[in-house]
Image (tube, rainbow, N blue to C red):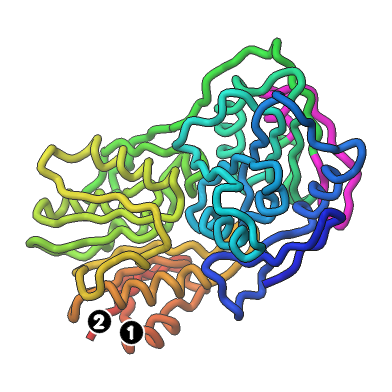
């Protein structure tokens, strides 16, 4: 836990799930810079019927918690970010309903008085959200983006300029920068280009030739990522009424391939991204018959799964949390998989070879075998004994 101190007060903040070993803070210099600006005379939040205060992409709830007195609407694609916001409100003695939590799948407010955007890692997600919010922005709307200097590019500014209106940046402060955008109601209101769809290549195993739906913000949304492509060539050959989990499902290609190869299986698609789970469901429904059995869960890995209930877990774990490189998410996934698997159940993982997940899997499961490998990737198999 770390304390964010502003001129309006101090806030104890933590990521979710809270881990005392986690070296990363729940806020950074760009959050502090934006709050400092808002608390200054030139950045004072307007009063009156201008519309909702909307915070997009608040990573761990730092902005929403500090602005809770304005009863903001938070739009976040991250289940963990939403849980962090709720926990941080409670941690600081603020009412749970002080922030209205929405996902990108929800209808945004009709009228926005202040739009605050924490620049996301995904330019596509930023584009989609600006398109969705543009109809609610008016000439009096205050629009401010924030991010670290390394996160704000010419393409970032071009999106604000094209979708919202004239845009300029602030001076850098502690390697952070603000984006000031003046809404232009005369700009044409074009629809978002998302979701994108593409056909899987011939070497995609049982899913070859199928069409994938990709909502904005999911990993590698405009093409099949090379790790998944490698995994699809080496998926386990199983039959019968297996319960299979596509863990960290993204657009659901792995689970779809498993379902097509074994029509008797029951699939569960799990991701902490609302956009990913929506992509997986659309991909699955479009490529399977009415008898296909699947559930779709936005959640914290397998935290909600029944112990000893799963036969097979397929996993392509991330090794980034926003801009930070970390194996914390993979470790959480591995531990959750072991708890959810039946005795004899298997976890299959594809990962960059250099990450050394085989060591972690041996520690968690007591065993790990290499199924396949090339110079970049390995497919690993661990069995619950």
Magenta stretch bounds: 157-178
Q: How many marks?
A: 2
CA–CA distance in space, label 2 to label 1: 6 Å
Q: Quadrant of the C terminus?
A: bottom left
Where on the picture, by quarter, is residue 22? bottom right
Q: Is residue 148 left or right of residue 202?
A: right
- Asked if residue 186 lies in the magenta stretch, the reply is no
Compared with residue 166, is residue 39 higher up or lower down, i.e. above or below?
A: below
Residue at screen point 44% across, 82% down: 360
Q: What residue is shown at x 39% (from left), y 52% (from top)?
A: 298
Q: Mark 2 falls on what kind of element?
A: loop
Toward which corner of the image does residue 169 lie, by quadrant? top right
Pick the residue in front: 83 or 206: 83
Which residue, given by chain and number where applicable, does mark 2 sit on? 384
Label 1's element? helix
Foreground residue, 370 or 85? 85
**Quick check: 340 left or right of 32?**
left
* Residue that label 1 marks: 365
How far across and down, in percent of the image, does residue 356 sit? 48, 78
Residue drawn at x 62%, y 65% as measured from the top left: 91
Residue 252, horizontal then vertical, whole percent: 33, 49
Please state, as top left, top right, bottom left or bottom right, where the N terminus lies in the image.
Answer: bottom right
Rendering coords of residue 384 (x, y %): 25, 81
Residue drawn at x 30%, y 63% is 314
In the rendered image of this protein, does residue 26 appear above or below residue 200?
below
Marker disc for residue 178: none
**What is the crowding at mark 2: few (fewer than 14 residues within 10 Å), some, or many (at least 20)?**
many
In this rendering, the answer to whether 187 lies above or below 318 is above
Q: Are marks 2 and 1 in contact (CB under 8 Å)?
A: yes
Which residue occupies the foreground of this view, 134 or 284? 134
Instruction: Find residue 47 and report its horizontal and vertical position in percent.
Output: 77, 30
Q: Earlier in the sequence, mark 2 or mark 1?
A: 1
């Amino acid at each position: 836990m770390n304390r964010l101190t502003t001129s309006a007060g101090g806030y104890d903040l933590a990521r979710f799930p809270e881990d005392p070993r986690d070296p990363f803070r729940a806020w950074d210099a760009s959050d502090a810079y934006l709050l400092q600006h808002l608390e200054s005379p030139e950045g004072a939040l307007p009063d009156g019927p201008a519309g909702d205060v909307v915070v997009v992409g608040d990573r761990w709830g730092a902005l929403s918690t500090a602005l809770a007195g304005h009863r903001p609407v938070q739009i976040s694609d991250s289940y963990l970010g939403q849980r962090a916001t709720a926990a941080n409100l409670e941690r600081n003695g603020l009412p749970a309903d002080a922030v209205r939590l929405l996902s990108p799948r929800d209808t945004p407010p009709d009228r926005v008085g202040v739009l605050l955007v924490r620049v996301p890692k995904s330019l596509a997600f930023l584009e989609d959200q600006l398109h969705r919010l543009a109809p609610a922005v008016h000439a009096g709307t205050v629009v401010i983006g924030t991010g670290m200097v390394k996160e704000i590019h010419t393409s970032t500014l071009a999106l604000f300029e094209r979708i919202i209106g004239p845009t300029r940046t602030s001076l850098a402060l502690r390697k952070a920068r603000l984006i000031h955008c003046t809404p232009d109601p005369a700009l044409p209101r074009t629809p978002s280009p998302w979701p994108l769809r593409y056909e899987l290549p011939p070497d995609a195993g049982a899913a070859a030739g199928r069409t994938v739906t990709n909502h904005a913000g999911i990993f590698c949304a405009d093409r099949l990522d090379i790790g998944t492509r490698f995994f699809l060539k080496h998926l386990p050959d199983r039959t019968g009424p297996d319960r299979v989990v596509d863990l960290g499902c993204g657009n659901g290609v792995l689970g779809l391939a498993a379902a097509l190869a074994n029509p008797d299986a029951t699939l569960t698609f799990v991701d902490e991204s609302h956009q990913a789970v929506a992509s997986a469901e659309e991909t699955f429904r479009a490529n399977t018959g009415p008898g296909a059995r699947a559930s779709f869960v936005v959640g914290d890995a397998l935290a909600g799964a029944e112990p000893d209930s799963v036969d097979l877990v397929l996993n392509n774990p991330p090794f980034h949390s926003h801009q930070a490189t970390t194996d914390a998410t993979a470790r959480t996934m591995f531990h959750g998989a072991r708890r959810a698997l039946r005795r004899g159940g298997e976890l299959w993982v594809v990962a960059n070879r250099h990450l050394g997940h085989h060591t972690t899997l041996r520690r968690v499961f007591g065993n790990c075998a290499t199924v396949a490998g090339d110079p970049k990737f390995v497919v690993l198999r661990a069995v619950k004994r």
